[in-house]
Amino acid sequence: MKKFIIAEICVLIALVGGFWLGRVTGNNTSYEHYYDNADKAWTAVKQIDEPPVELDSPDKSRLREVRAAYREVFENYPDSMWADDAIYQLASRLPRTDEEAFALFRRLINNYPDSEWADDSMYAIAFASYKIAEDLKKTGTLESLDAYYDRAIALYNQLITIYPGSELSDQAQFNTAMCYYGKGELNNALVQFDTLREPFSDSPILYQILYVTGEIYLKRQEYENARVEFTNVVDSGDPDLAPLALFGIPQAYLAEGKYQEAIDGYQKVIDLYPGTKAGQDAYFYMGWAYERLEKYDEAIAELEKGIELFPRNENAANAQVYIAQIALANKDITTAVDAFQKVADNATYDYDTRRMAQYSVGKIYEDNSEMDLAVAAYQKLLTDFPEPHREATHQSNNINENYIQTLRSAGL
């Protein structure tokens, strides 16, 4: 039995050996020219990808071709010097929050830890995780955000530890603090930023640290500390952060109830940075500061100026509603109705805000016993806004044909 087994094994070895020899001799070009073929494949894909196709390219056919070519390089030549480059290039042509991109970046990190792209890949996953959390926060989702922030923190710390000489290490340290800020752990974030001040004293990141520190102080209602940090950023002259920081100074005054100081600060933003987002927003916030001082004409004037100059600004719709509310509080029915109607008729504003505005027009007329006008406004509500308001309890959802018929009867 043993001899039989031995003989069986010998035959098996012979078969395997023959198979291997046959594989080498029969497909000589596969391995003899492995690296030459890898070089040729890489040269070919770089030619296809010239100029480099972007993720948002309208030429989707070319984008698919480039993606396929990069995949062929690292799938067919995983031991070549181009494999990690190909993985990174393919992952970079996918949405950064896409699971396939995550899988490719992880594959590069695990299989090619010494690659020049390994730290970039780790950073990409970390930043994408942070971005997912930030985007979910904007949507008001009930989904827990901490898991995304915590994953980002873990990966940033891993990058800092494993690749201390990486050019991304400094940004990873700053982003770690930003994750704590995103989680709402303001004290922890502040400690993180404070520890970075000295080592980053000669880095442009310092001004990012100062600016976010100012935002943290503002949220903690430490207004003077916030203004100090914002002023330091303004004095730096940083082209991106200086306008935001200068805007942050009157924001601190507004939150503190120092409305005239806020108005003066907003005017300074408008004078120095008229074309920036901060310069646009200053008009709207200046109007709100005037309203707090009960200077209603000035408030409406600034709000209208902001709307006229920057109709696409995110504050425009709310500013128009605010004008209506100011007018209504001062029993200026004509101005209030006109302002609400402008909101309702503006197709660039969101649906719920427009529906609310149309309802408000009808409600104003109804409260003032102008039933024919109220009926017309409510009928326009049903015609132009057939879908209910997102808030189930919103009063506009009570308006229906029966309600309108009742008003018609009351007007007779």
Image (tube, grey):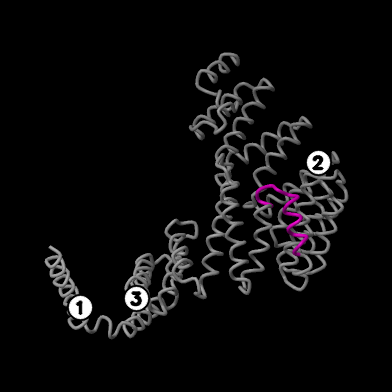
Residue corresponding to mark 2: 291
Image quadrant in which the C terminus is located: top right
Residue corresponding to mark 1: 23
First in sequence: mark 2 vs mark 1:
1
Relative side of 35 to 9, left or right: right
Distance, label 3 to label 1, CA atoms, is 18 Å
Relative side of 147 to 309, left or right: left
**Nearest to the observer: residue 337 or residue 56:** 56
Residue 127: x %, y % from top left: 57, 60
Residue 329: image quadrant is top right
Residue 283: x %, y % from top left: 75, 52
Identity of the residue drawn at 78% across and 44% down: 288
In this rendering, the label closer to the viewer, 3 or 2: 3
Residue 196: image quadrant is bottom right
| 365 relative to 162, above or below | above
Residue type at mark 1: give it: Arg
Residue corresponding to mark 3: 77
Distance, label 2 to label 1, CA atoms, is 85 Å
